Image (cartoon, rainbow, N blue to C red):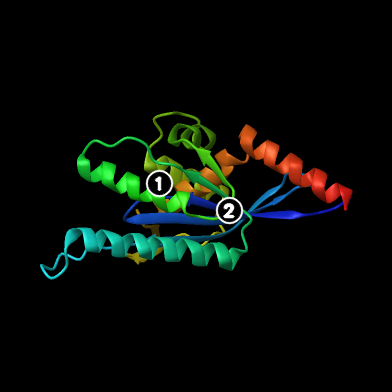
Amino acid sequence: MFHHQLSIVGIDAAFRNVGLSHASYDLSNGQLTLHDLRLIETERDNSKKVRRNSDDLRCAREIVQGVRQYIQHTQASMLIAEVPTGGQSASAAKSFGIVVGILAGLDLPLIEVKEEEVKMVTVGKRNATKKEIIDWAVDRYPSLPWLTRKYKGQIELLGKNEHLADSVGVINAGVITEQFKSATAMATSFFNKK
């Protein structure tokens, strides 16, 4: 029996913080193994020297470059992403549009998951909090490089882990979708014929 590993990058995309995780999926037995995490952060240039739309373009380029470098580094052959929807304000809608454009511009097959799917797979309830998802991800994958700091002699998790935990949840939600099952069935059939 063959043992082909599918390299997957999970993406929790937002305009200020993009959580990325890397996993391998064994096509012969369905075992999912998480390997790594990365956070891409962009910061607004609040100086009066830069136009807002020029700064948005710079931030979008930083995200695209960071995601592409991570995909290349992990040699990913598939992406799973939580694609944002809706927006309570014009600013949120603009950010969502930029993020959707970034995801659309990536050159690998992309499995889409919804926020509710991630919450159900991780915590088991639609109204799961960010902290609950972080706790789930850290408990399930304690050896991943979670962001921490030392405070009063204790190691504590940083709030920024919400984006990394979401990316881990994205992968876990994506591998149980019908879209993923169809894609891996085709890949398995291809490798079995070799």
Other-residue count near label 2 (Cα within 10 Å), few / some / many at <14 / 14–19 / ≥20: some
Outermost residue toward the top in this view: 126
The disc placed on residue 191 is none
Q: Which residue sits at x=54%, y=59%?
A: 144
* Relative horizontal placement of residue 43, taking residue 186 as reference (left or right): left
**Foreground residue among 129 and 27:** 27
Give yes or no for contact between labels 2 and 1 (Cβ–Cβ under 8 Å). Answer: no
Q: Secondary structure at mark 2?
A: loop
Give the residue type that dot 1 points to. Answer: Val
In this rendering, the answer to whether 18 lies above or below 186 is: below
Q: Which residue sits at x=52%, y=49%?
A: 168
Other-residue count near label 1 (Cα within 10 Å), few / some / many at <14 / 14–19 / ≥20: some
How far, Cα to Cα, is label 2 from label 1? 14 Å
* Relative horizontal placement of residue 165, taking residue 14 as reference (left or right): right
* Relative horizontal placement of residue 31, taking residue 137 as reference (left or right): right
Residue 24 position, x and y percent, is: 66, 54
Q: Which residue sits at x=39%, y=41%?
A: 84
Residue 119 position, x and y percent, is: 46, 35
Q: Secondary structure at mark 1?
A: helix
N-terminal-most mark, 2 or 1: 1
- Please say whether residue 121 is visible from this viewpoint: yes
Circle 1 residue:
100
- Please say whether residue 160 is visible from this viewpoint: no
In this rendering, the answer to whether 189 lies above or below 74 is: above
Q: Which residue sits at x=24%, y=63%?
A: 55
The disc placed on residue 108 is 2
Give the residue type that dot 2 points to. Answer: Leu
In this rendering, the answer to whether 89 lies above or below 39 is: above
Residue 10 position, x and y percent, is: 53, 51
Residue 162 position, x and y percent, is: 40, 49
